[in-house]
Amino acid sequence: MAIGHEAFTHMEGHKRFVQIDHNDLFPYLLVNIGSGVSMIKVDGDGKFQRVSGTNVGGGTYWGLGRLLTKCKSFDELLELSQGGDNRTIDMLVGDIYGGMHYSKVRLFQNHV
């Protein structure tokens, strides 16, 4: 028997609860987000393996965000991040090759 409101999707700011059919449950990915992130692939009862994760999660993001900004809430920090451009701080392939055109080094830039 499924517990109501135990699984949901979250897209474009809207949460939608989904019903779980326990006869068609596996495989699934269990993701735990806190001060770190763990991703566990569950193949059946007692059959699981950690497939990925990081020690940087929501708690670390919020702590650093509070120190670096004047944000008073996690939601305010997320909203502020929507206006950012990671290309101004992340090292890109173009930075490594000195702005050389990607085709000259046999790389092609993806446009998102």
Image (cartoon, grey):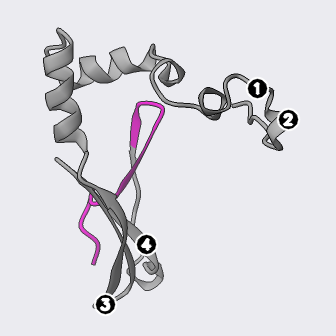
Q: Is residue 67 left or right of residue 101?
A: left
Q: Tell me which numbered mark, 3 or 2, is placed earlier along the sequence.
A: 3
Q: Residues within 10 Å of mark 1 (few under 14, many from 20)?
A: few
Q: Is residue 7 magenta?
A: yes
- On screen, residue 21 above or below 48: above
> Which mark identifies residue 104?
2
For marks 4 and 3, give the CA distance.
12 Å
The residue indicated by pointer 1 is 100
Mark 4 → mark 1, Cα distance in angstroms:
43 Å
Write down the region rendered in magenta: 1-15
The local secondary structure at tag 3 comes to: loop
Say which residue appears at 41% left-offset and 57% top-offset: 18
Dot 4 or dot 1: first in sequence order is 4
User: Which residue ends up furthest to the top in the rendered image?
Assistant: 70
- Of the two numbered discs 2 and 4 in the rendering, the one whose residue sits closer to the viewer: 2
Seen at 27% across and 78% down, the residue is 1
- Can you give x and y, in whole percent of width and height, for residue 16 in the image? 41, 45
The residue tagged 3 is: 45
Q: Are marks 1 and 2 in contact (CB under 8 Å)?
A: yes
C-alpha span from label 1 to label 3: 52 Å
Q: Nearer the viewer, residue 24 or 47?
A: 47
Frontmost of labels 3 and 2 is: 2
